[in-house]
Image: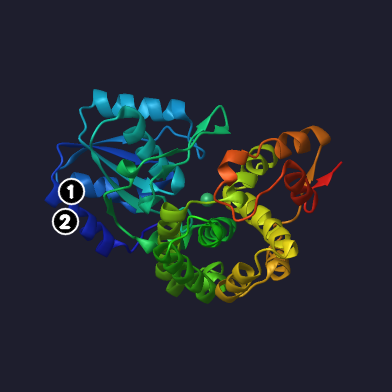
Amino acid sequence: MKYNNQIFLDEFKNKMLEINPQKVLFVCSKDYDRYGYRKALDEINIKSVSFTSFEPCPEVSSVENGIEAYKSNECDFVVAVGGGSAIDTAKGIKYYSKLDFDILAVPTTAGTGAEVTRFSVLYRNKDKESVSDYSIIPNFQIFDYTTLKSLPYEQKVVTSLDAFCHSVEAFWSVDATNESRKYSKKALSLFNDNFARYIENDDSTFEPMLECSMLAGKAINLARTTAPHAFSYKLHKLKGFHHGRAVAVSLAYIWKFMEESNKLNELMKETREITGFDADGFINFLSKLGLFDDLTMTKAQFDETIHGVNIQRLQNFPLKLTEEDIKNIYCSFIDVK
Ligand SMILES: [Fe+2]
């Protein structure tokens, strides 16, 4: 498939000529070679070596292989082309190697905002182990929104819901600032204006949805994610749900719990204003997308899930959640068989 992304390839080539690295570690899954970024490096005679062996949920062991590839090939720069996994792998290579190099990121999904955040979401034997450091924020970005054209419908839905959740969670966070709230509001406005047409692959939505994802990333970079992300990881691990789906279904029922607490009325009112939903409206919206299908668990899975929420990670959540609250929230959307 030929992409008409020459304008972005030219922007990339100009940037790389300006940086002029000796050798680039090109972190990109094999699928995404088709966008032409590696070839573009060849065209401007910048040496590169590909690093493709990382998982969709990158393992720390793969990051260690990436560090080995970076060092043994004497690289001095990293380009990451892909969704969160490629960009987080590149950031993990920088974090764990403690080497000082710059990263250029080309996001190919509109969801994680990884191209502008200090987080790298990694896994150790399938359990989440994310790291955070301002030094790993990619130094350069190319927003090639044409890559969104070939993203399948399901991927468009779940990745953009991740961006929606980043915006809302950053807005709820007790660490929210005026700046992070500005990013959240703008991201949600772009989401609301474009989501329905975006999932139908309307070309005119690609640029604003990539901007939505980037702004939502900037919001969590300041305020961090909160309870819905903490709730999501076991759903992702045990049910195999995509990260964005696991977060969205968690957020829906945490939202309902927040409304019913009657302790956050002003925040809930603002949330309705910026999202266009109340909790029931959001639950309905996700139901129509089929995201509540297959929410059954065995008793053993359920026990692992409710004990898998790290209470420490809930410190920026505006309500104090007890273990009983956590169990009740999960019970409101998971059917234990
Ligand atoms: Fe996320």
Q: Residue 245 or 23: which is nearer the viewer?
A: 245
Dot 1: few (<14), some (14–19), or many (≥20) neighbours within 10 Å? Answer: few
Q: Residue 176 or 228: which is nearer the viewer?
A: 176
Q: In the rendering, at what x and y percent does residue 69 appear? A: 30, 27
Asked if 127 appears above or below 279 in the picture, the reply is above
Tell me the mark number nearer the camera, choosing from 2 and 1.
Answer: 2
Q: In the rendering, at what x and y percent does residue 82 appear? A: 40, 48
Answer whether residue 239 is visible to the viewer in this image.
Answer: yes
**Which amino acid type is marked by label 1?**
Glu
Q: How far apart in space, not on screen, are marks 2 and 1 (Cα)? A: 12 Å
Dot 2: few (<14), some (14–19), or many (≥20) neighbours within 10 Å? Answer: few
Which image quadrant: the C terminus?
Answer: top right
Asked if 52 appears above or below 164 in the picture, the reply is above
Q: Residue 149 or 136: which is nearer the viewer?
A: 136
Secondary structure under badge 1?
helix
Q: Tell me where residue 25 sits by quadrant.
A: top left
Q: Tell me where residue 283 sits by quadrant.
A: bottom right
Q: Which residue is the site of mark 1? A: 43
Query: Residue at position x 46%, y 59% from top?
Result: 110
Secondary structure under badge 2?
helix
Q: In the rendering, at what x and y percent does residue 122 appear? A: 48, 36
Answer whether residue 152 is visible to the viewer in this image.
Answer: no
Query: Residue at position x 79%, y 32% from top?
Result: 300
Query: Residue at position x 45%, y 47% from top?
Result: 84
**Which amino acid type is marked by label 2?**
Asn
Q: Residue 193 or 189: which is nearer the viewer?
A: 189
Name which of mark 2 and mark 1 comes first in the sequence: 2
Where residue 14 is drawn, which disc sits there?
Answer: 2
